[in-house]
Every structure is written in structure tokens, then in C-alpha cells.
Image (cartoon, rainbow, N blue to C red):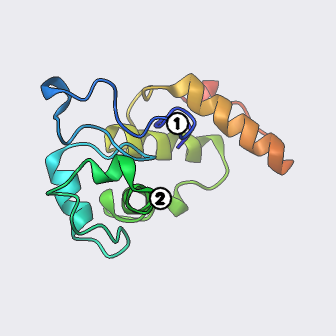
Amino acid sequence: VGTESNGLTEWTQNPCSSATAAPYCGRGPLQITGHSNYAFCASQGVCDCPTIEGTPTDVSYDTNIGVGTAACVWEALSGHSLSGDADGTSTGLLKTACIINAGHYPCGTPNGWSSRQQYWAKANSCLGATVESVDALI
């Protein structure tokens, strides 16, 4: 979430233009992108966002809808919940980053990989968990 939305400060992809599939550019905490993904999440109960296909900007400006799209990405968009992939290991971090960013695993080096590692290390530090190296994974 930190990498996708710049620490939860940017809920609309910049730029959001025809080059980035506007109006279905990346929006929300996990930057849902593309008309088909908006339509899919609009149909998912976990999202509780049935209007986003018609009003995609709501994802950026309504916190409940934005978080709902993040729940959709996490729980349903890939065809399974990412909770089993996010198992606390560096491989789990890489798997979830690939699935969120590229739609599949393996994916090579996902966009924002160093930022993702930094957020993961900080979260683990706050929780008192040990961080193993992820550099050897990619």
C-alpha cells in the first residue's frame, strides 16, 4: 500500500490521462487500474463499491470506496486471497508485490521494488520481526 499510493498520500495515478487508461487509471490505496478491473471490483461484495465502473473518481475521493477497492485487489482480483501469499517471508513479499503490480508471479523485479522492501522492513521493525534479505530472490 505504501508504494502504490506514496504512503497513502496519492490516491490517483499521476498522470491520469489517456496514456494511463483514464478515467480508469490507478486509483485508491492499491491503485486499481483498467476498466475491466473496475468492473470486476464493482461486482464484488468485498469491495462494496457497485458504482465505480460509472464513477471511477470515487475511488480517489471516497475513503470507504478506495479501501473497498484495496480489499477487492487483496481478496479477489487475482482469483484468490493474497493472505496466503503474504506469509511474512521475503518470498511472500515478492509474490504479493508481483501479483499486485504485474498480475502474476513470478514477474522479475516489480515496479517500486526498493520502496516495497523499505516499507516492509519498516513494518517488520515496528512489529519487532526479523527481516531476511530479499535481494537473492530476484
Q: Position of residue 49 (x, y in %)?
A: 30, 67
Q: Amino acid at mark 2?
A: Leu
Q: Tag 1: Cα neighbours inside 10 Å, few (<14), some, or many (≥20)?
A: few
Cα–Cα span, label 1 and label 2: 23 Å
Residue picked out by circle 1: 9
Q: Amino acid at mark 1?
A: Thr
37 displayed left or right of 125: left
Toward the viewer: 59 or 79?
Answer: 59
Secondary structure under badge 1? loop
Which residue is depicted at the point 37% across and 62% down? 72
Which residue is depicted at the point 21% across and 62% down? 40
Residue at the far front in the pictured view: 61
Residue at the far bottom in the pictured view: 45
Is residue 130 shown to the viewer in this render?
Answer: no
Depicted 79 relative to depicted 109: above or below = below
Residue picked out by circle 2: 82
Secondary structure under badge 2? helix
95 displayed left or right of 42: right
Q: Quadrant of residue 103?
A: top left
Tell me how many marks there are.
2
120 displayed left or right of 31: right
Toward the viewer: 68 or 102?
Answer: 68
